[in-house]
Image: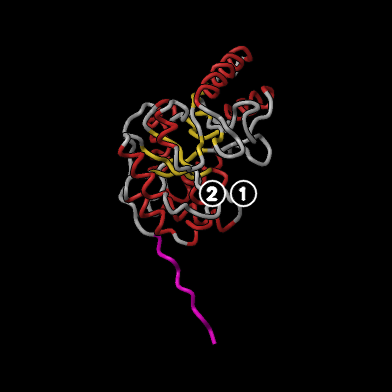
């Protein structure tokens, strides 16, 4: 199994703080059946992790894992918070796509979607990149206005739901929205977004069990296969997106 979103590189952001933390996370991942992890440190106002640093840290961690006998392969990635100059920084070689493919993570602020997002995601696609919106299920504006996400997906963006969200660790509302995104073909990847082995652990095995029972084996195949296709820079599988129907509220007098 491949995990395409993980904060396993030591000392770069709010994920693993030390090499020991990274090794502990890798061992936990291996227990869940994960064999490959794309390391995706934050790129935002708080954490300025550029491509060169990420590539160097990935090489160091792969060496340490081999030395420790942990059979996990780390690939380079990045989680950039959306910003206006991302295309310029990509062209300067500072933005790291997922394993050097045409797939690029895009993170929105937790409480809104910037007004320029639709145009920027379109411009990224004109450059030959495919934006993958991370954890849309935890964005309060998208929860309130799911048609905003539908519009972005219809125009070519992809999305990734977090395993812990689906399992209910961020609350019932986020769990429900995660399930709605799967039902409406508005998400294409499942990943851990793991930061540690405590309160932000992998939960991939648990999430896949839940998907199998709620949605069936076809969805297990979809998510696991799409992660492999992404790593290999191939076109992923996707169904026609649908709008999420908001349940009507009945007033009783």
Q: Position of residue 144 (x, y in %)?
A: 49, 62
* x 56%, y 38%: residue: 44
From the top left corner, tell me how far across and down residue 202 is, in percent.
Answer: 58, 37
Closer to the camera: disc 1 or disc 2?
2
Which residue sits furthest bottom?
Answer: 253
In this rendering, the answer to whether 185 lies above or below 5 is below
Q: What crowding class fits label 1: few (fewer than 14 Cα within 10 Å), some (14-19), or many (20 or more)?
A: some
Q: Magenta span has 170?
A: no
> Residue 93 sits in which quadrant?
top left
Who is closer to the viewer here, 218 or 135? 135
Q: Tell me if 65 is positioned left or right of 115 in this view.
A: right
User: Is 242 placed left or right of 6 in the picture?
Assistant: left
Q: How many marks?
A: 2
Q: Quadrant of the C terminus?
A: bottom right
Q: Secondary structure at mark 2?
A: loop
The residue where tag 1 is placed is 169
| Quadrant of residue 104 within the rendered picture | top left
Magenta-drawn segment: 244-253
Q: Earlier in the sequence, mark 1 or mark 2?
A: 2
Query: In the rendered structure, are the residues bearing label 1 and label 2 in contact, judged by CB atoms less than 8 Å apart?
Result: no
Residue, disc 2: 109
Most frequent secondary structure within the magenta stretch: loop
- What is the x, y in percent for residue 55? 51, 21
Identity of the residue drawn at 44% across and 37% down: 86
* Relative depth, front residue between 246 and 9: 9
For disc 2, the neighbor class at 10 Å (few under 14, some 14 to 19, many from 20) is: some
């Amino acid at each position: 199994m491949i995990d395409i979103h993980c904060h396993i590189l030591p000392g770069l952001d709010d994920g693993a703080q030390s090499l020991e933390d990274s090794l502990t996370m890798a061992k936990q991942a291996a227990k869940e059946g994960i064999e490959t992890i794309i390391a995706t440190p934050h790129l935002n106002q708080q954490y300025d992790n550029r491509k060169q640093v990420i590539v160097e840290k990935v090489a160091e961690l792969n060496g340490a894992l081999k030395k420790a006998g942990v059979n996990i392969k780390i690939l380079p990635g990045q989680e950039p918070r959306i910003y206006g100059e991302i295309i310029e920084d990509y062209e300067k070689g500072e933005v790291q796509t997922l394993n050097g493919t045409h797939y690029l993570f895009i993170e929105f602020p937790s409480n809104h979607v910037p007004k320029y997002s639709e145009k920027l995601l379109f411009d990224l696609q004109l450059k030959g990149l495919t934006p993958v919106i991370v954890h849309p299920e935890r964005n309060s504006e998208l929860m309130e206005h799911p048609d905003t996400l539908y519009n972005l997906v219809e125009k070519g963006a992809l999305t990734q739901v977090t395993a812990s969200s689906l399992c209910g660790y961020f609350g019932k509302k986020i769990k429900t929205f995660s399930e709605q995104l799967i039902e409406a073909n508005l998400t294409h990847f499942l990943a851990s977004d793991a930061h540690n082995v405590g309160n932000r652990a992998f939960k991939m095995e648990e999430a896949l069990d839940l998907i199998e029972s709620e949605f069936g084996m076809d969805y297990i195949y979809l998510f696991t296969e799409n992660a492999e296709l992404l790593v290999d820079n191939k076109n992923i599988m996707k169904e026609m997106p649908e709008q999420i129907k908001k349940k009507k509220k009945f007033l009783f007098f």
